[in-house]
Image (tube, grey):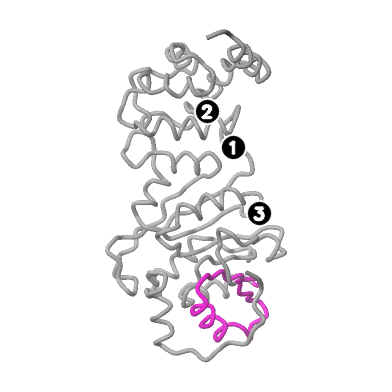
Amino acid sequence: MAFLTRPPRQTSRSSERQARRRLGQHFLVDREVAARIVAAAELDDRPPVLEIGAGLGALTDLLREATDHLYLVEIDPGLVNVLLARYQADPAVVIIEGDVLRVDLPQLSGEASVYVVGNLPYSVASQILLRLVELRWWCPGAVVMLQEEVARRVAAKPGGHDYGVLTLLIQIYADVTWCFHVSRRSFSPMPRVESAVIRLHLHATPRVPMADLTLFQHLVRSLFQHRRKMIRNTLGGFLATVDVGAAEAGAVLHEAGIDASVRPEQVSLEEFAALTAAVLGRRPRQHEVAGSRRSRSRSPR
């Protein structure tokens, strides 16, 4: 997982097909769609760009025209070989062979910040998006293509079945814009599902006041395990896990300004943030919790 300096090996159409089969990838072959993706990134200032899953280079030529510093990340050695054969002579293009979820991209690129563009592999798209959220200090924005079902979840608003954990974990730091739908006929081999392109504008700090991010994440994950149940029936179980009495669920909801009869999928990001603050305000201090537990452990049976 480093900058590549090895010479390109001889490539063939059969090696490209083998690379496709190994990872079950679907490659963009529609140049019009590729052009629309690059246009959606709005790279007028020619920032450094990192392309995730460069594959066979469908986006790469267009991105190269839009930037003077282009980083290509590709995990498959066969596809890396294809990219080397095409771009190694260009000093503005750097090829990084490795897993985008594992490689230290800020260190390897040496850039203070980059804009991310990519056709994300369906199987790890959610993990990559969450990785970009982690790297928000380095990646201020991204335009990505992914499975339409996942794109709808990321861009969802409260009240629909697409709205959930992934929505909130990303939107706490990102403004998400739906760009356009992409037909499965734009890929080879043709997948069974449709795709979509979304744009993320990432913020260094939460978009809403957040009392405790870890507590917020645990709260969201817990309540969405029962997304169709009324929140008053599920919050109590969570409260018991954070040293707040389950019986206080009604009071906590009232303090957060949330109707006890709504379901988690109807609660907005701002309301989840308020709920987090209300829960945090009722948690005992850590040393008090520890002291209470020690007292219980010493009590006679």
Q: Amino acid at mark 1?
A: Pro
**Span of residues in magenta:** 68-96
Q: CA distance from mark 1 to mark 3?
A: 15 Å
Tag count in the figure? 3
Looking at marks 1 and 3 on the same chain, the residue that comes earlier in the sequence is marked by 3
Q: How many neighbours does mark 2 have within 10 angstroms: few (below 14), some (14-19), or many (20 or more)?
A: many
Q: How many neighbours does mark 1 have within 10 angstroms: few (below 14), some (14-19), or many (20 or more)?
A: few
Q: Is disc 2 placed on a helix, strand or loop?
A: helix
Q: Is residue 98 above or below residue 206?
A: below
Residue farthest along the front direction in this orientation: 301
Q: Is residue 66 above or below residue 144?
A: below
Q: Is residue 225 magenta?
A: no
- Which mark, by number, is residue 138? 3
Q: Is residue 79 magenta?
A: yes
- Which mark, by number, is residue 273? 2
Q: CA distance from mark 3 to mark 2?
A: 25 Å
* Residue corresponding to mark 1: 206
Relative horizontal placement of residue 110, taking residue 33 as reference (left or right): right
Picture quadrant where residue 108 is located: bottom right
Query: x, y percentage for residue 156?
Result: 39, 42
Looking at marks 1 and 2 on the same chain, the residue that comes earlier in the sequence is marked by 1
Q: Residue at x 34, y 31 (%)?
A: 226
Query: x, y percentage for residue 246?
Result: 44, 15
Residue farthest along the bottom direction in this orientation: 10
Quadrant, the N terminus: bottom right
Q: Is residue 91 above or below residue 207?
A: below
Q: Amino acid at mark 2?
A: Ala
Looking at marks 3 and 2 on the same chain, the residue that comes earlier in the sequence is marked by 3
Q: Is disc 1 placed on a helix, strand or loop?
A: loop
Circles 1, 2 touching at the beta carbon (< 8 Å): yes
Query: x, y percentage for residue 124?
Result: 45, 57
Residue farthest along the left direction in this orientation: 192
